[in-house]
Image (spheres, helix red, strand yellow):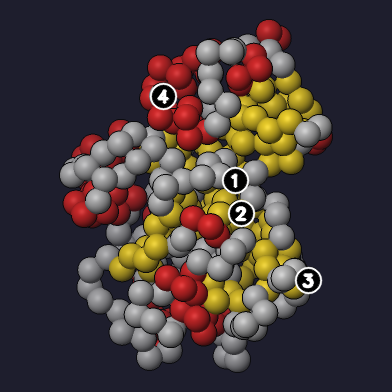
Amino acid sequence: MKLVTFQCRGHRSIGKVEGQQIVDLPASDRTLPNTMLALLQGGPALLDRAREIRVADAVTYPLADVSLDAPVPNPSKFLAIGMNYRRHVEEAKAAGLQVPDSQVWFNKQVSCVNGPFDPVHMPKVSDKLDYEAELGVVIGRRCRHVSEADAASVIAGYVVCNDVSVRDWQMRSPTMMLGKSFNTHGPFGPWLVTPDEIADPHALQMRMLINGECRQEVSTGEMIFNVWQQIAYLSTVMTLEPGDVIATGTPSGVGAAHKPPRFLNVGDVMRVEIDGLGHIENVVVAEPF
């Protein structure tokens, strides 16, 4: 099932994609909530109810007529792992960065969340804007101390992410948080794909195109720490909540690693594609205020 948060004709709701139609879930079944967070918090019973709605009996909108928001517009956490593909680690070492042996985590403040096709701001304070194609994982139930063997059971689904980064602000602090958290710098979507549609999240081809030029391409199987290991590690420290977003790392080919660097400019179009999940596409615009 592909779940979306959408807007159409002044109406905002959640739905599921069926071909070229979006089924408006709460309009089709009034027992369902009208936000993605509430749907995920309702657990498997609500998801099963959403899955059972037939298009013939539902309130629908043409996919072409709607505007898609981030599938979970208001996650409580947006966490991202750094240095999780070997060739990207080699890029970092070549740039003189120290790379620890353990998982490297940072927080993207949730105010950075952006829609899958919405503009991304070029900050007024920097011209070092960079891109990072990533597979995203959305947590489906409240959990703590999850084993690697059980990690798949806490996942609500998968999304396409772009961990947009402001490199000079990232390097000002060892935590990287500021350079990862500018407004609009967390686009993801276009929909939340439930695990039953993804046979193996570690066998997906992922690519980043800038103005049609492929800058990054990798199989998610090349992660150093896989999705299960990431969830086990994070849940050792903190309680994960329904709707929390985890960005699982970017491969080599980021703009900062080129010689000379190839940072983004106003007007550039970033397109992240992951086979089986779809794509997101965001144009860089000048920060409006």
Q: How many numbered marks, from 0 up?
A: 4
Horizontal side, residue 26 vs residue 281: left or right: left
Query: For the residues marked 1 and 2, what is the alpha-carbon distance in whole angstroms?
Result: 6 Å
Tell me: residue 179, above or below residue 13. below
**Screen quadrant of the N terminus:** top right
| First of labels 3, 4 by sequence position | 4
Q: Residue at x 53, y 38 (%)?
A: 192
Q: Which mark is residue 70?
A: 1
Query: For the residues marked 3 and 4, what is the alpha-carbon distance in whole angstroms?
Result: 41 Å
Q: Nearer the viewer, mark 2 or mark 3?
A: 2
Q: Which mark is residue 42?
A: 4
Query: For the residues marked 4 and 2, what is the alpha-carbon distance in whole angstroms?
Result: 24 Å
Q: Which mark is residue 114?
A: 2
Task: Give the SS element for disc 1.
Answer: loop
- For label 4, count other residues whose C-alpha is less than 10 Å away and answer few (under 14), some (14-19) or many (20+): some
Q: Residue at x 22, y 42 (%)?
A: 144
Position of residue 58 measured from the top left corner of the image (x, y, whole percent): 68, 13
Task: Give the SS element for disc 4.
Answer: loop
Label pair 1/2, CB-CB below 8 angstroms: yes
